[in-house]
Amino acid sequence: MASLVSLQGYGSDSNNSDFEDPDELLQHLRPIESVHTSSQQLQLIVTPQVTSTKELDDRHHIDPLTKEIHYNPRYDELYAPVLGPTTKPQPQTTTTTFDHINKNTLAGHVEPAHFNDFEFESQRRTFTTYGYAVDPSVSGEPEDGRKFIGDVGTAKETSGITVFETKHKPDQPQKRRRDKNDNAGDIDGFKGPWAKYQGEQTVMKPSEEEQQALDEILAKRQKRGKQNDDKPIEEKSLLHIKDAYDYQGRPFLHIPQDVGVNLKSPDPPEKCFMPKKMIHTWKGHTKGVSAIRWFPSSAHLMLSCSMDTKIKIWEVYNNRRCIRTYMGHKQAVRDACFDNDGKQFLSAGYDRFIKLWDTETGDCINRFTSRKIPYCVKFHPDEDKQNLFVAGTSDKKIVCWDARSGEIVQEYDRHLGAVNTITFIDENRRFVSTSDDKSLRVWEWDIPVDFKYIADPSMHSMPAVTLSPNKKWLACQSMDNRIVIFSALDRFKMNRKKEFTGHMVAGYACTLDFSPDMSYLVSGDADGKAYVWDWKTTKLYQKWKAHDDVCIGILWHPHETSKIATAGWDGLIKYWD
């Protein structure tokens, strides 16, 4: 600085005495004052103050003098170094107060602690069943006990219930409560155990709007349905013989006495034989015959019903003519049945009508319908109940009509399938019915609850049943190509020793019949053959080709030793001897 001052006078002379101020001359050499610099604004901090994470200890440190801890600490927290100076400073070591405690497991040190056995088992079972359990690791926070491990979503849905708890689910309806009043002193208001439920409605009636909608639906259904169902066609009959009466004025229903056989005899023939040849064929039906029936007691006439909607009555003796044809059904006729004296008969057709005919005049006396197809129809055999008849229908019911009033007097509604047959037994006090539900039911007359129900996994549907002449056995045509025998007395037990096989009837209601002396059993089959078995030995004695189509009906004449009538779907009725 001194040298700079000495230079101040270099090169000066007296002429420059009035030169500038020396302070101004040295102004550029002086240090810059801090007020005039921008270092404060542009200062770069190379080493900012940063806290290192390695130096921090995030563990929850515990005072070693603490006697009680209200949460479950982790091992590294419980045995962490004590903060602050140790009681005995040792600069060369880092030992702590807890260093004398050893790790007795891989995860740390386990101290003996009390744990409720039930709570442990409850959480274990809950985890096994529901897939979640309460988190056992506790940190001392208020949320402890509400944290779950495992399926947390299910735990939230069920509110964390255990297997020993039940919770009402909101989607389930609450249990109904009874409107109780158990006070027996309250004579008028006492309800006892018969109280209704709260808000229970015992009589349900549609509202006005609902009733109006129902009426519209029913009206549409009636329009859509067949209009001609309730309008049966006009019934008429045609007499095929010249004279309906003989020279003595007797109608064709009169039992002839000049045929070589006593047709009025109540006793069957002593000994029956197997037929050997065909002696006559009745022709007249244009479609298959569905059923044939003998005239009651005498069997000098035969009634046949057919799929051509017609019913015909034929002579069995003399000229064997067709006497009368009854026309009144719109569809195929399924079944027919005489009353006890043969003066009237019933016919059941697929047009859902049952019609009562006068056999002699051909007039239709009455017609009955339940709007369902009748599959079988039977008069009650008792003389004092000839006005009653039963019909098995397609809607699983057996319906009883009074022929005089035309009204339904009883319904037997227990079957689970269409009713196929009805057979009266036990002096007509009971009847047996079979159905498509593969069962056999026994009923007391006029009691609509079956007192005997026979159904077995091995049983098949039995669409044809015949009672033996001695009233002891029921022969049933089973759909597994067998004829099975049931006792018609008390127990209705299947006779497993008597089983008739060899024919093929699966899918067809081929009827069967006994010889009058009960020595033979005869049946038709699906190939048009007729079969004869010995009743005692169940041995197949004879079979022959009777029809070109299904042999659906077969009857043994009750007064002849070896005469059999067969009916087939080829439209023919044949007589064998």
Image (cartoon, rainbow, N blue to C red):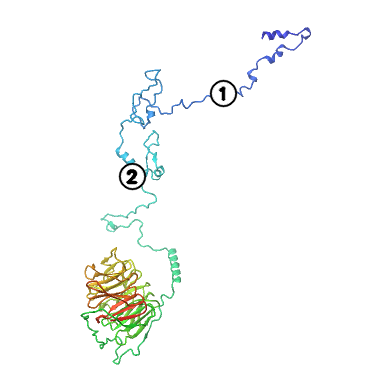
Give the secondary structure at mark 2.
Answer: loop
State how far apart marks 2 and 1 are (Cα). 64 Å
Label 1's element? loop
Image: 232 above or below 166: below
**Residue 249 point in image, percent of width and height:** 30, 91
Residue type at numbered disc 2:
Val
Extreme residue toward the bottom, this view: 247
In the rendering, at what x and y percent does residue 37 appear? 64, 20
Q: Quadrant of residue 186?
A: bottom left
The percent coordinates of residue 79 (x first, y second) are: 37, 27
Is 509 or 525 nearer to us in this picture? Answer: 525
Residue hosting label 1: 46
| Residue 329: image tag | none
Q: Quadrant of residue 508?
A: bottom left
On the rendered structure, is 393 left or right of 43? left
Q: Amino acid at mark 1?
A: Val
Q: Nearer the viewer, residue 473 or 163?
A: 473
Q: Nearer the viewer, residue 317 or 533?
A: 533
Q: Name above or below for residue 53 compared with residue 157.
A: above
Residue 163's disc number:
2
The answer to whether mark 2 and mark 1 are in CB contact below 8 A is: no
* Mark 2 surroundings within 10 Å by alpha-carbon count, few (fewer than 14), some (14 through 19), many (20 or more): some
Return the disc, 2 or 1, that comes first in the chain's sequence: 1
Query: Where is 228 relative to 261, above or below?
Result: above
Name the residue nearer the viewer: 301 or 132. Answer: 301
Kindly tell me whether residue 404 is visible in this rendering.
Answer: no
The image position of residue 203, as x and y in percent, is: 36, 62
From where the camera sits, is residue 543 visible?
yes
**Residue shown at 71%/9% (left/top)?**
7
